[in-house]
Image (cartoon, grey):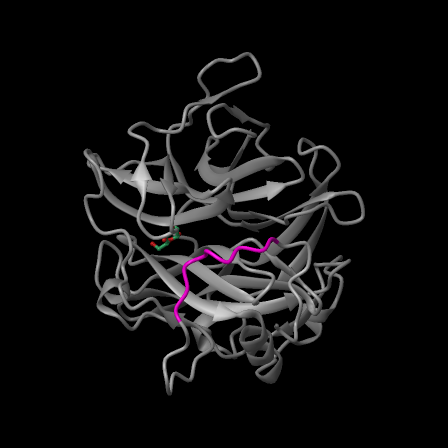
Amino acid sequence: MSKVKILNGTTLPNIPWQPRPEGHTLPIWRYTENPIIKRNPLPGIARIFNSSVVPYGDEFIGVFRAEATDGVPFLYLGHSKDGINWQYEPNVIPMVNEKGENAIPFYQYDPRLIKIEDAYYIVWCQDFYGASLGVAKTTDFKHFERLENPFIPFNRNGVFFPRKINGMYKLLSRPSDSGHTPFGDIFISESPDMVYWGRHRHVMSPNGSNWWEGMKIGGGANPIETSEGWLLIYHGVCNTCNGYVYTIGGAILDIDEPSKVLYRSRRYLLTPEEWYEERGFVPNVTFPCSTLQDDATGRIALYYGCADSYVGLAFTDVDTLVDYIKENDGAGWNDHDLGRR
Ligand code: BMA
């Protein structure tokens, strides 16, 4: 039984799990058989990475960022009994608009998948006359309806909260520009209906004092509701003489006003160190997109993209992670405030 409680969660005794290795000092530890998805995972697809998983019935369903052999990314669906070995559907997820017409965009990447009330939502980055967020809804993983794009360009790293807060859907995002943006803060917006988004608030900026997240940050996995606040696993980027390095960080947000950061670890949770994180299509990338958690034990399984080439799996538990973030707290006034100017 964990000290910190996972709230509104699900009891999932069958999530992937390995105990913390003896002597491991960081709060997240890797699956020993990583990467779980290797190169050329299905015909015509060169790489699957930054991807997202939910429990569904007696299995797990994943929405995968799949880079085709023409280099263009789209979203594919996969099924798994154990959350580790995946069977993929052969075609791009068939999204339609409200008239039932094809609404698959020109490209799609970095999906986050979430259950909110009785429906599942996917939010991803796509072309909307420039990179911005797309959203689709499904209840059966067979029919996918595109909703209105929440924001104008440029924007990336959309992450929904798993329930309405004060009657509103909440969406994290990272406004940006058209390229490999050398800046970026996390903001939060709300909507009564998944169509009109507003009441925007600032959540966090990159922190120049913590060099691993000195250049830009972006939301990662769906926030986990706990008795200590919303547990947010996010990514932070630093610039080096040899390019960007993507590292995994953690923060705890206020349960009713999640634009207020209660705690933010100044030390990272996981950074590229293994061959599949350091070497690949884009080297030195660990990019968190999704977690599964078991509220009975507090166990958390984290899915993260590795070097824009593979999917990795890592583990933590809610007590270890919350304690680490609090012990290493470096949140400042700019984090604690409401984020409204
Ligand atoms: C970001 C996104 C991610 C990618 C990362 C590293 O801008 O495009 O999909 O993993 O860069 O290349």
Furthest residue to the bottom?
Answer: 23
Residue 15 on the magenta segment: yes
Residue 95 drawn above or below residue 73:
above
Estimate the x, y position of residue 330 in percent, counting from the top left: 60, 80
- Residue 126 vs 178, above or below: the answer is above
Labels in figure, total: 0
Where is residue 326? Give x, y as percent. 62, 80
Q: Along the line of sight, which residue is nearer the eye, 202 or 301?
A: 301
Residue 73 in picture, x, y percent from top left? 32, 38
Q: Is residue 207 left or right of residue 284?
A: right
Direction from residue 99 to residue 281 in the image, left or right: left
The residue closer to the viewer here, 275 or 240, is 275
In this image, 128 relative to 279: left or right?
right
Q: Residue at x 64, y 41 (%)?
A: 116
Q: In the picture shown, does residue 144 fall above or below 25? A: above
Quadrant location of the N terminus? bottom right
Residue range of the region highlighted in magenta in the rendering: 10-18
Residue nearest the viewer, comparing 128 with 9: 9
Is residue 273 visible in the rendered image? The answer is yes
Confirm whether the magenta stretch covers residue 125.
Answer: no
| Quadrant in which the C terminus is drawn | bottom right
> Looking at the image, which residue is at 43% across and 53% down?
181
Classified by dominant secondary structure, the portion drawn in magenta counts as loop
213 and 261: which one is in front?
261
Residue 266 position in % (x across, y down): 54, 78
Q: Residue at x 42, y 84 (%)?
A: 25
Q: Using the image, determine if residue 141 lies above or below residue 216.
A: above
Residue 152 seen in this snapshot: no
